[in-house]
Amino acid sequence: MISRRLLPLTFLIFSLTLIPGKTYSQHQTDERIYEIIENVSAERLENDIRTLAGFGTRNTFSDTVSTTRGIGAARRWIKSEYDKISAGCGNCLNVFYQKDFVTTKDGNRIPKDAWVVNVVAIQKGTKYPNRYIIMSGDIDSRASDTMDFETDAPGANDNASGMAGAIEAARVLSKYKFESSIVYVGLSGEEQGLFGGKGLGEYAQKNNWEIIGILNNDMIGNIEGVDGVIDNRSFRIFSEPVPPTETEQERNMRRFYGGEVDGISRQLARYVHKTTQTYMPEMNPMMIYRLDRFGRGGHHRPFNDLGFAGIRIMEAHENYNRQHQDIRTENGIEYGDVIEGVNFGYAAKLTAVNAINMAALAWAPPAPKKVEIGGIVEPSAKLRWEKATGDIAGYKIYWRDTTSPQWQHSRFVSDVNEFKLQGIVIDNFFFGVATVGKNGHESVVVFPSGTYR
């Protein structure tokens, strides 16, 4: 982490403190975001990771009765931490267990019938309580054989690091008020088939949650790759290109209008990339154009399957000797996901990445709806949208080359519902629109879903 005082002078000229209730230039940044970064504690993360690893195994099917070992002791401890945080902020968190029952018929990684229990803490928003930004970590761990629920599997990095990150983010962000709701959750059953994410996603759908997105944190503490690379600055952001729930009409529209890499999860990934580069320029966020690692999965996928935006945030260089391995030494190589493989300073950086993005999104107004684009066979591009509610300063129109991974250009417009970009030929760029609040925070960019003349 770096001090704001060390940022380049050209950056600081525009980085003035934001005061709630005042309208700001789009060049300014929010001093509270820097405070959030500085308040994330590597020491607290270390304590939490050591505690979680100390339960021996957190396999989803391990002991649920013991007070010192197994998944039951781990989830009760996590809930107690959320309860403590809530007590310290005037009961600002709604803490509860969300659970679903699984049987051996539900998959080939289930050794016996059991409850899959998530630990949920919700910090309700003051203005949009039914809009949710979610940060998840996984409670469970595994040994070499995922069906083995008795062998020690400390899971220090996979995924005590992500779980500890969610707890630490709750400690830091609970000191602030947000317009939208924030969810800090520990998900179970990840190693057996992403059951915790599926259960919470269905719970959110049943309760009509409007989900801004889920930031799935799975392994955020390792800096030494099995390839020998040591890197405590880079991290990966995985996102799928378009939702699997899109309709045949939407697929056909994309053939003619583009948008193959502009789904809601990809826009969330771009948001995280941009916010990180703005407030944590020492970090190197890597956009990975893939749902997850090659042929593998994570707990954001069940949310994606339901049509919600979701991404995976994780280390850049994995160490497979420390993943899904019984603790042992073979041929001079040490195997096992033990505490010595976790870099707590790096885990703090990635926790801060999550915290500042959740804060920015929870302070931002809702995104515009029904964004449409026009300008076919014209020398200009036209956009219109359904205006958002709240303290809106206006909207920002983004555009980029069709081959660019990031939004390159933008123009702020007032609180209107349509605008024409003179001289910007629609054929040569992709476009999107974000809502800008009077506090300077922006929504996620929305890619046009329709056309007009």
Image (spheres, helix red, strand yellow):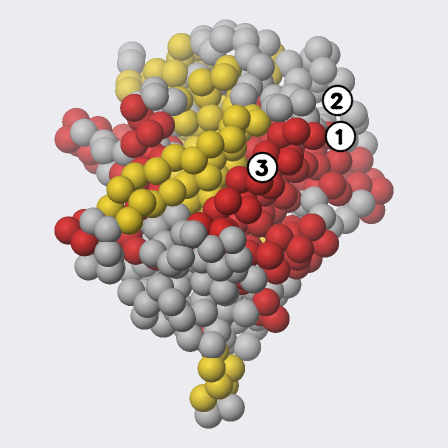
Residue that carries the numbered disc 2 in the rendered image = 18
Q: Return the disc, 1 or 3, that comes first in the chain's sequence.
A: 1
Relative side of 350 to 57, left or right: right
**SS class, disc 1:** helix
Residue that carries the numbered disc 3 in the rendered image = 82
Q: Position of residue 173 (x, y in %)?
A: 65, 32
Q: Amino acid at mark 1?
A: Glu
User: Could you tell me if residue 51 is visible in this image?
Assistant: yes
Q: Position of residue 428 (x, y in %)?
A: 38, 34
**SS class, disc 3:** helix
Q: In percent of the image, x 24 and y 56: which residue is there?
A: 112
Count of numbered marks: 3
Residue that carries the numbered disc 1 in the rendered image = 31
Q: Amino acid at mark 3?
A: Tyr
- Badge nearest the viewer, 3 or 2: 3
- Vertical relation: 71 (above or below) 244: below
Q: Amino acid at mark 2?
A: Leu
Q: In percent of the image, x 46 and y 92: which residue is there?
A: 331
Q: Residue furthest bottom?
A: 331
Q: Position of residue 284 (x, y in %)?
A: 60, 53
Badge 2 crowding class, 10 Å Cα cut-off, few under 14, some 14 to 19, many 20 or more, is: some
Q: Nearer the viewer, residue 398 or 190?
A: 190
Q: Nearer the viewer, residue 1 or 114?
A: 114
**SS class, disc 2:** loop
Q: Nearer the viewer, residue 318 or 187?
A: 187
Q: Return the disc, 3 or 2, that comes first in the chain's sequence.
A: 2
Q: Position of residue 66 (x, y in %)?
A: 47, 55
Image quadrant occupied by the C terminus? top left
Check contact, mark 1 vs mark 2: CB within 8 A.
Answer: yes
Relative side of 168 to 141, left or right: right
Disc marking residue 204: none
Q: Return the disc, 1 or 2, that comes first in the chain's sequence.
A: 2
